[in-house]
Image: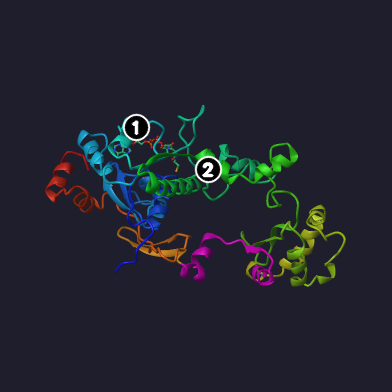
Amino acid sequence: MAQKTALEDVQVLDLTQFEAGTSCTEALAWLGANVIKVENPKGGDQGRGASTDTPGVDSHYFMLLNANKRSITLNLGTDRGRQIFTDLLKKADVMIENFAPGAIERLGFGYDVVQKINPRIIYAQVKGFGEGPYENYVSFDMIAQSVGGALSLTGTTETEPLKPGPTIGDTGTGLHCAIGILAALHQRERTGRGQHIKVAMQDAVINFSRIAFARQAASGKAAVRSGNRSALGTTAPSGLYKCKGGGLNDYCFIYTTRAGNRHWDRLLKAIGRADLIGDERFNSPEKRWTHHDEVDRILSEFTQSRTKAEVMKMLGDAGVPAGAVYDTMEITQDPAIQKREMIVTVDHPKRGKFTLPGWPVKMSESHVAVDRAPLLGEHNAAIYAEWLGLTARDLEELKGKDVI
Ligand SMILES: CC(C)(COP(=O)(O)OP(=O)(O)OC[C@H]1O[C@@H](n2cnc3c(N)ncnc32)[C@H](O)[C@@H]1OP(=O)(O)O)[C@@H](O)C(=O)NCCC(=O)NCCS
């Protein structure tokens, strides 16, 4: 018997596109939900075709964000398409979309309508902005990161504001939305009712920027970007130390707690400088911060003649927080990361072997093996038969009328 999964009885109608919505439903799929992408027959999720290196073949971007889902096509611009979607909604637990503001209402499926079709449904929306002057604006990750504070906090005062590499405005919002959906499913157990969930990308990034508000509270001024230095400006070391090799990422990040000297003392022992334990210049986080140039010099002497892997191992073994700067290829090739299915290779009908990151949450009673993303409309026959009892002939007719 197949192993049970946490959300195996949850049916999700997924109208999402690009990343901010698709990352939400991918998470739900990895928790075991039955996620069905409902896509425009004319090209589907815009992420399929955008930035693909091979026209007509789904982009790698799409394949990274739509694993473990199935796909049906449905033209919601037609009466028949809207009628079919209404029938699907009656059987769903969750509906989610991230179109531009007003688009889903124009298609005829605003919350007020859907709630009447299925009062148990959890209806989730991702938008760029929450209620306020910008609520009708469209958005992408970099816009959300700008207005959520992330750019103002990244880089140094000598650089212009920088966009963080990871797409926290998109995937960060998707994961917030998934948390809301899980809570709503739990609440429905008690009330029998669904609810309306809205997540603004700006608000999700503000949540990720939370710690900067401690800096603001302490100084009375807007938090400034501090590069690799401790965000709160109260301890050293906190920074990148150049290692042997001279490559773009041949660095190790070394940090010691701002709550005492434990890590610092271990660090000094590990690098052969036990003579500095208790030294007046360094015997509190604040004093180390005052003398951070000297701290950096001492550590650089140690790191420059060793590879980042050696530095990380020596310090990690000694109980010091240290992290080599890994690039995506090093992550991909790391056997331990592969073993715990954080890097997985799947077979794709058009692309062949494709390697992607898996799902970081490991659960003892729910395991979903990573599977490839679906082709556009790949599951029309299976889903329309399973959910609505439609036959091959019905589907032929719907295709002829541009409904699917
Ligand atoms: C991402 C975004 C900027 C893209 O903007 P866009 O391409 O100009 O606008 P939309 O995505 O809403 O457009 C999709 C269109 O396809 C239509 N469409 C989508 N699925 C359809 C279907 N199954 N059948 C028929 N029409 C469909 C929509 O109705 C809409 O048409 P309209 O413009 O006539 O209303 C915008 O959707 C947005 O701001 N979304 C909210 C924030 C967000 O999630 N951003 C993405 C971060 S990755």
Display colour scheme:
rainbow
Q: How many numbered discs, if any?
A: 2
Asked whether, in this view, residue 313 is left or right of residue 38, the answer is right
Asked whether, in this view, residue 307 is left or right of residue 207, the answer is right
Question: Mark 1: is the Cβ under 8 angstroms from ligand 1?
Answer: no
Q: Position of residue 275 (x, y in %)?
A: 84, 70
Pointer 2 or 1: first along the chain: 1
Q: Is residue 280 above or below residue 39?
A: below
Amino acid type of the residue that numbered disc 1 sits on in the rendered structure: Asp
Q: Mark 2 points at which residue?
A: 204
Secondary structure, mark 1, is helix
Viewer-proximal residue among 97 and 155? 97
Q: Give the range drawn in magenta.
A: 311-340
**Quadrant holding the C terminus:** top left
Estimate how packed mark 1 is, as few (under 14), some (14 to 19) or many (20 or more) residues with alpha carbons within 10 Å: few
Q: Mark 1 points at which residue?
A: 112
Q: Can residue 182 be seen in this snapshot? A: yes
Secondary structure, mark 2, is helix
Q: Which residue is drawn at 49% across and 31% down?
A: 131
Residue 151 highlighted magenta (yes or no): no
Estimate how packed mark 2 is, as few (under 14), some (14 to 19) or many (20 or more) residues with alpha carbons within 10 Å: many
Image quadrant in which you'd find residue 108 = top left
Residue furthest out toward the left: 393
Q: Is the magenta stretch mostly helix, strand or loop?
A: helix
Q: Nearer the viewer, mark 2 or mark 1?
A: 1
Q: Residue at x 24, y 36 (%)?
A: 82
**Quadrant holding the N terminus:** bottom left
Q: Position of residue 376 (x, y in %)?
A: 29, 49
Q: Where is residue 170 in the image (x, y as percent from the top left)?
A: 48, 45
Asked whether, in this view, residue 348 is left or right of residue 388, the answer is right
Asked whether, in this view, residue 324 is left or right of residue 260, the answer is left
Amino acid type of the residue that numbered disc 2 sits on in the rendered structure: Ala
